Image (cartoon, helix red, strand yellow):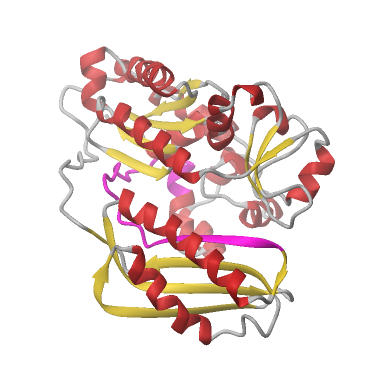
Amino acid sequence: MRKILHIDMDAFFASVEQRDFPELRGKPVIVGGKPESRGVVAACSYEARQFGVHSAMPCAHAAKLCEHAIFVPARFEAYRAASLEINEVFKQYSSAIEPLSLDEAYLDVTRKAEEYGSATEVAKRIKCDIKARTDLVASAGVSYNKFLAKIASDMDKPDGLYVIRPESAEQFIESLEIRKFFGVGKVTEKKMQKLGIFTGADLKALNKQQLQAYFGRSGAYYYNIARGVDERPVRSHRVRKSIGAETTFEQNIVDKSVIWQTLLRLCERVHGVLSDKKMDARTVTLKVKYSDFTLNTRSKTLSESFSDKDHISGVLPELLKKTQAGSRPVRLVGVSVSNLTLKREPDSPVWPAKPTPGSQLGLF
């Protein structure tokens, strides 16, 4: 049986800020736009969360909820650097690592569980090593598949370590509120509640045909996870579909020079991620949202792949001409690249999802 970990850094962006600037420790920190801006909260510390602040919330509303919050701009280079350090810790315990973002990843530790006695012990070591190397805190979920490991990592935050063993999974899932199921968003949650589905037990009561009738292709997924079945392997070196960055202006902008300088800064961020991921791209997309919230996107696909920022910025003037930026007030701009490919073949193999010979339930 597989041993899967989901490692999730606690309040990652805000924690990096508190680590790098000791005067912020123990205080409500909000990473994102200024309180008077139209930006949104990128991340917030646990001290800010106590007041109801959460990510994606408008900064102006967050400032009202937590009047003494400290707003700081995002420093993505610092977050990427910390993420790379964390990934180095992961490599000591597994070659099957699937990053989901800068601050979370799946690991298949089936082999290491046998070496260290249990997957729980591996998770403890990873948490300690991350703390020692980065002075940041991680929470870990341990189980036999990705679905349960991800839920487990959120059960005891911050600094959590939660284990869902195979023998207790059925009871755990049946008692779990449907909103806590990974893959069930707010819209799906409301739809399920209208159907009388409030817990895992309610979801399990429906057969596959009923779920497919209600939820289409997702019905089979819901049927399986209600029974603790998730055969997805931990995939190393996932190929992303796109890499992008965007920003919302504090005031509507008509000055093309301001728009252009902002786009160049976004190009820097996109190029940084492209370089970190060792990827090439072929398509550049420009995103422009006007003051009335009308959205325009313009794209161009090049004949050859690229990874340097000059290729990205070189396409933008042509795309910008195809928008009404400058003649209409602009609220938001964004840059992204797609049609991505890895620069080289990955060095690490992906372990199979099949049970490893000799694995035992006790290794959790």
Q: Is 226 part of what is drawn in magenta?
A: yes
Residue 158: image location, x then y, percent: 57, 24
Above/below status of 168 relative to 279:
above
- Residue at 73% x, 57% y: name it: 38
Above/below status of 350 relative to 262:
above
- Residue at 60% x, 22% y: name it: 22
Q: Quadrant of residue 167?
A: top left
Front residue of 49/358: it is 49
Quarter holding the C terminus is top left
- Residue at 50% x, 34% y: name it: 151
Residue 71: image location, x then y, percent: 70, 40
Count the numbered circles shown: 0
Q: Quadrant of residue 67?
A: top right
Would residue 230 be found to the left or right of residue 94 on screen?
Answer: right
Front residue of 30/348: it is 30
Residue 210: image location, x then y, percent: 53, 58
Residue 250: image location, x then y, percent: 72, 60
Front residue of 45/216: it is 45
Residue 228 in view, yes or no: no
Q: Which residues are magenta?
A: 223-250
Q: Is 224 part of what is drawn in magenta?
A: yes
Would residue 66 be found to the left or right of residue 329 on screen?
Answer: right
- Residue at 35% x, 57% y: name it: 240
Above/below status of 219 relative to 172:
below
Residue 328 in view, yes or no: yes
Quarter holding the N terminus is top left
